[in-house]
Amino acid sequence: MFAARRALTGAVQRRAFTASARDLSKVTVLGAAGGIGQPLSLLLKLNPRVTDLALYDIRGGPGVAADISHINTKSKVTGYDPTPTGLASALKGAEIVLIPAGVPRKPGMTRDDLFNTNASIVRDLAKAAAESAPDANILVISNPVNSTVPIVAEIFKAKGVYNPKRLFGVTTLDVVRASRFVSELKNTDPVDENITVIGGHSGVTIVPLFSQSSHPDLVGDATLLNRVQFGGDEVVKAKDGAGSATLSMAMAGARFAESLLKAAQGEKGVVEPTFVDSPLYKDQGIDFFASKVELGPNGVEKIHDVGKLSGEEQKLLDACLADLKKVNISKGVAFVAENP
Ligand code: NAI
């Protein structure tokens, strides 16, 4: 029986490893030696859909790559330093570029407090990506996501290579947290909890839609809402100055990358909430919004509207839209205009 299982496992692995040309997937992590970057790179190394893993950081990329490269999965791992050609080589040929480069929060900080440092880091990495991997899917993790995603868009526009279908703000951690917190309250398996979270990725812009889940009674649960909107603060506080969520974020980033790879390899019906260039509220001057997005070989396949909301959720959405419009998005756009 064990022999049979071994033979089967071997066959499955062989199938995974004899990838056709279109299944060759290079994934690049920018900021790979950081708190998120390292576990994210580890999880990507364990993903059989990834054939080539490029790890770049301003310090420590090759070390992380050497370590991870000993793991006995098929993908080839290469580490890069900021040498004259390092970043370009890491990016060249990438299908997915994940960006967790930047500084994390300390207790008492909001994600917006990170803007001054992270805006220029993301801008410079976006410039390199626009030059060396203009067709890649760009997955922005660096905070404040609501502002860093517009920064990438502006840079790609300036370079004449902007494709709105291939730019994503990673909001998956909000979805992961919501399903976990609901399962704790309802004594269910979190895998079965599918909570849609819309809006953006900070404080009141994070809007969970419990009315659309199997627990509509949770609408109006102020404690749960606060946990979903400010769950990151729990981690920042517990780490007491040593950073923000890294391990759960790595899992969320790896999940989103896996969804994109699945969709690129032909799987249908892959849907993830994510912060994208969206038509939903453009008439209100809001160019980016997170809602359920169906993924496909070209990145964004279909942007779902928010569906039916309860009265309370509509109020939360109104507050979210005001914040996105007032500060978050325009701040990113203005930054690139002033600091091209
Ligand atoms: P970290 O400080 O542990 O790691 C950041 C890494 O980026 C470091 O290794 C650093 O050397 C590198 N880096 C800095 N400038 C760079 C550049 N120009 N090019 C390449 N690499 C560069 O920080 P951590 O905890 O990994 O967080 C990273 C970012 O992710 C933060 O902005 C944080 O706020 C954000 N974050 C986002 C979440 C989300 O849900 N989207 C959740 C948690 C954190």
Image (cartoon, grey):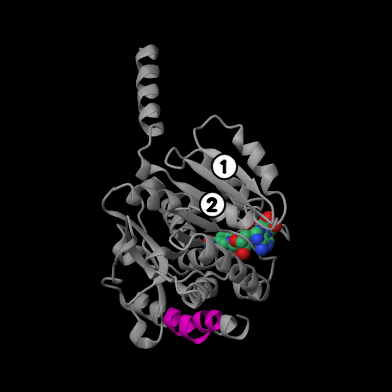
Q: Is residue 77 visible?
A: yes
Name which quarter of the figure residue 321 lies in.
bottom left
Q: Answer whether residue 103 is visible to the viewer in this image.
A: no
Q: Is residue 43 left or right of residue 262?
A: right
Residue under the point 29% across and 48% down: 266
- Provide residue 79's location: percent of width, then percent of height: 64, 46
For the residue pair 184 and 262, the one nearer the viewer reads as: 262
Question: Considering depth in this image, is 230 or 252 the residue closer to the camera?
Answer: 252
Question: Gap in Å between the C-alphas at discs 1 and 2?
Answer: 12 Å
The answer to whether residue 208 is left or right of residue 56 is left
Q: Quadrant of the C terminus?
A: bottom right
Where disc 2 sits, the SS reads strand
Image x and y of residue 105, in percent: 66, 65
Q: In which quadrant of this rendering is ligand 1 seen?
A: bottom right
State the image coordinates of residue 328 (x, y, percent, origin top left).
52, 80
Which amino acid, mark 1?
Answer: Leu
Say above or below: 334 vs 136: below
- Classify mark 1: helix, strand or loop: helix
* Quarter of the view holding residue 320: bottom left
Residue 42, labelled with which disc?
1
The image shows residue 277, relative to residue 17, as above or below, that is below
Q: Which mark is residue 263?
A: none
Quadrant of residue 274 within the rendered picture = bottom left
**Magenta stretch, residue numbers:** 319-333
**Identity of the residue drawn at 46% across and 42% down:** 50
